[in-house]
Amino acid sequence: MRTVLLALAAVLLMVAVLGCRVVKGPAAGTAGPQAGHKQQVSIYIPCGMLLPFNDALKQFEAENPGVKVAATYENSGTLVRMITDKGDRPDLFVSPGCCEAQVLETRGLVKKEDTRTLGSYEVVLIVPKGNPAGVQSWEDLRKPSVKTISVANPDWNSIGHYARQGLTKMGIWDSIKGKMFFTEHAVDAYANVSQRKADAAFSYLTCPLTSNPEKLSSEKVDVVAKLPPDTYDVPTVVIAMLATSKNKPLAREVMEYLLQPDVQALLEKEGLPNERKVATPSLPEPTTGKGT
């Protein structure tokens, strides 16, 4: 009887563990490739870009019924560490700017010839709804009424990197450094502003306000200024195939699919724009921080 009970307990434990597995993305709610799928390709995507990629990848699957796209959405820095520290090996990785892609490139996990640029962003200044500190411009960040500026750490986060680059060229960065509260992820900086724990923060114009409004609702923040485009490099969104991909032909097919004009239009509709012409961004020097 004891043996039977132990066996039953083991089965229940296995069911409980397997029942907690969640595959995010177009096939959410499944634990793996569905019956009839012959090929699978995996892709890591920053969670702020959920809507455009979810729609585009669903469309890809519909047009390629023999293919399953396994998409994982998480903070970009977390995704990088899943690859560099935990040994995850997706076929594709989407970088929201230069910093995240730089880490994988310097470690030999991504080659430049295996990357494509999907779009570009603009950096903006956001404040809590109602703008209690009265911030109307970048120069206003110097005002005594601005006590705290929440910033994704520019040493390993692309938004912080581009904001620092632009504000340094404008001669503002050094004068406001004492007000800055660095966060690990951009979403943490957004949360501080939306919860009125900070007077201002930096964000991309459409990401995540349009591309995943659950991460940053326009009902909780106001956009008060755009960073002048001549002060910083174009924040390009790059998709890269990992050198370790086990299905490179299919990974390349997904990459090229996302570049088709109608798919590009879909991505732009959901918040991944090509507002600024693509240029090769200057990459920051590799850092020894804890990641991106």
Image (cartoon, rainbow, N blue to C red):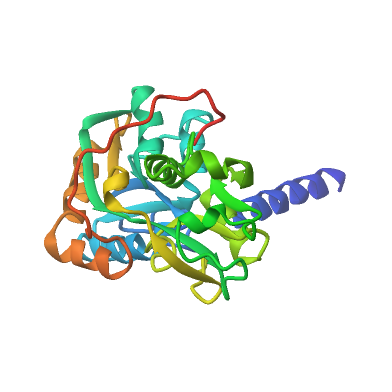
Is 228 on the left-hand or right-hand side of 180?
left
Q: Is residue 240 above or below residue 66?
A: above
Is 74 on the left-hand or right-hand side of 15?
left
Q: Is residue 6 above or below residue 66?
A: above
The residue shown at (28%, 39%) is 240
Q: How many marks?
A: 0
Q: Nearer the viewer, residue 267 or 27?
A: 267
- State whether residue 22 appears in this view: no
The residue shown at (32%, 68%) is 270
Give residue 187's quadrant in the image.
bottom right
- State whether residue 152 appears in this view: yes
Residue 1: horizontal and vertical position, in percent?
86, 48
Outermost residue toward the left?
A: 261
Give residue 169's quadrant in the image.
top left
Q: Nearer the viewer, residue 24 or 6?
A: 24
Is 104 on the left-hand or right-hand side of 88?
left
Is 189 on the left-hand or right-hand side of 6?
left
Residue 147: horizontal and vertical position, in percent?
66, 55
Residue 56: horizontal and vertical position, in percent?
28, 63
The residue shown at (19%, 48%) is 278
The residue shown at (17%, 52%) is 277
Residue 212: horizontal and vertical position, in percent?
44, 65
